[in-house]
Image: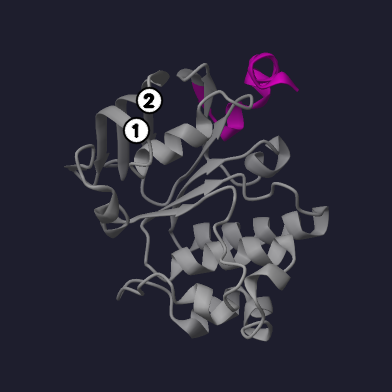
């Protein structure tokens, strides 16, 4: 199967600080891939590098055969990458409806009816300001907003961070439903139980480098290595 995304030899910098050192990651169509490692290992930076949000990057980021490494930042999303950052990026003084419509909807994007089928809470809160939503509702809004743009690959940075267990369960259900529809995902997640319930493959990241990779059914065989690198 042809890779949807092929990251090859990715280097990244914040100012003069060299933080990514030759990252190699692939994501196949419909696949969920998780990046795991300690805080500061380079997981979030890898996602930011894909969106051209670093000061400098080198290497290859090939999406459907097209190298995006020299693509201007404002054109990255149009190539099929949808980014949900850890901080969610919700505009607290805008309503849910206004937040949803900040990004343009494409022909491949979810309609309002589809969005509300996945996220009924948002339909009930359309007139509410983003700042008045719970953490879980803000996360749902951040994901829903991106889905309207029709991404072929969803980049998720710590989607369960700070959420109550019942909300984590709901987010997991939503993401599994999206996966069942064929949406590919690249996930950064500290909650290993959550990641194991969703990901097909894992990449271990340590000090800005890939330290190993394995399939979901090989997780137990790699448990000691994961513990050593992730610190659990």
Whether label 1 touches label 2, CB < 8 Å: yes
The vertical placement of 27 against 42, above or below, is below
Regarding mark 1 in the picture, which secondary structure is present there? Answer: loop
Classify mark 2: helix, strand or loop: strand
Tell me the quadrant of the picture where the C terminus can be found: top right
Disc 2 packing (10 Å; few <14; some 14–19; many ≥20) = some
Residue 214: say if magenta.
yes
Give left or right: position of 154 versus 97: left
Corner quadrant of residue 79? bottom left
Give me the residue at 74% from left, 57% from top.
169
Residue for badge 1: 55
Task: Judge whether 22 appears above or below 57 on screen.
Answer: above
Q: Mark 1 or mark 2, which has the lower sequence index?
A: 2
The residue singled out by tag 2 in the image is 13
- In the picture shown, does residue 129 fall above or below 177? below
Q: Quadrant of residue 69?
A: top left
């Amino acid at each position: 199967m042809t890779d949807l995304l092929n990251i090859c030899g990715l280097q990244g910098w914040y100012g003069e600080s060299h933080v990514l050192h030759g990252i190699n990651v692939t994501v196949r169509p419909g696949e969920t891939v998780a990046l795991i490692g300690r805080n500061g290992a380079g997981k979030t930076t890898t996602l930011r590098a894909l969106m051209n949000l670093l000061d400098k990057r080198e290497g290859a980021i090939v999406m459907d055969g097209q190298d995006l490494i020299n693509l201007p930042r404002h054109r990255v999303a149009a190539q099929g990458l949808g980014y949900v950052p850890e901080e969610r990026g919700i505009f607290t003084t805008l309503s849910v409806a206004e937040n949803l419509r900040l990004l343009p909807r494409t022909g491949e994007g979810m309609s309002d009816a589809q969005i509300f089928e996945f996220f009924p809470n948002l339909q009930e809160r359309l007139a509410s300001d983003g700042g008045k939503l719970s953490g879980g509702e803000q996360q749902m809004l951040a994901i829903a907003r991106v889905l309207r743009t029709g991404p072929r690959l969803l980049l998720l940075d710590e989607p369960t961070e700070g959420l109550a267990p019942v909300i984590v369960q709901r987010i997991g259900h939503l993401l599994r439903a999206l996966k069942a529809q064929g949406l590919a995902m690249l996930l950064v997640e500290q909650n290993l139980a959550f990641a194991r319930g969703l990901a097909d493959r894992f990449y271990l990241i340590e000090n800005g480098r890939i330290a190993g990779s394995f399939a979901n059914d090989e997780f137990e065989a790699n448990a000691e290595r994961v513990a050593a690198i992730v610190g659990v």
